Image: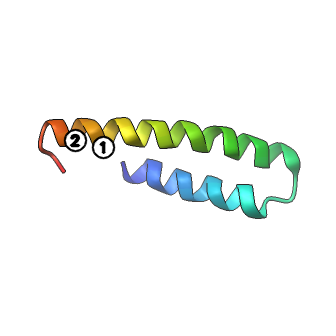
Amino acid sequence: MGDHIMDIQSANGESREGGLSGPRALAEKYRLMYQRHLAIFRALAARVHAN
């Protein structure tokens, strides 16, 4: 989960401060994927009482 949190933070930074539109769009696209995966992992951890 820590990796996805860092990936989301990196994508947020690229979306806000990126100089080129291509990398900004890619960061935004993958930020959504990382957020979905993180939500799934958190739900799974809660189900197995690992949080």
In whole angstroms, how far apart are the C-alphas of marks 1 and 2? 5 Å
Label 1: how many residues lie within 10 Å, few (<14), some (14-19) or many (20+)? Answer: some
Q: Neighbour class for label 2 at 10 Å: few (<14), some, many (≥20)? A: few
The answer to which quarter of the image holds residue 38 is top left
Q: Is residue 26 left or right of residue 19?
A: left
Name the residue nearer the viewer: 39 or 11. Answer: 39
The amino acid beneath tag 1 is Arg
Q: How many marks?
A: 2
In the image, taking residue 24 as reference, residue 36 lies left or right, namely: left
* 43 lies above or below 12: above
Query: Which colour style is shown?
Result: rainbow
Residue shown at the point (84%, 43%) measured from the top left: 22
Q: Secondary structure at mark 1?
A: helix
Q: Which residue is mark 1?
A: 42
Q: Which residue is mark 2?
A: 45
Vertical position of residue 5 compared to residue 46: above or below: below
Could you say where residue 25 lies in the image, as x and y percent from the top left? 77, 43
Residue for point 36% across, 35% down: 40
For residue 12, what is the image quadrant?
bottom right
x, y percentage for residue 23?
A: 79, 46
Label 2, secondary structure: give it.
helix
Q: Residue at x 71, y 57 (%)?
A: 14
What amino acid is found at the position of numbered circle 2 in the picture?
Ala
In this rendering, position of residue 43 left or right of residue 21: left
Residue projecting furthest to the right = 20
The answer to whether mark 1 and mark 2 are in CB contact below 8 A is yes
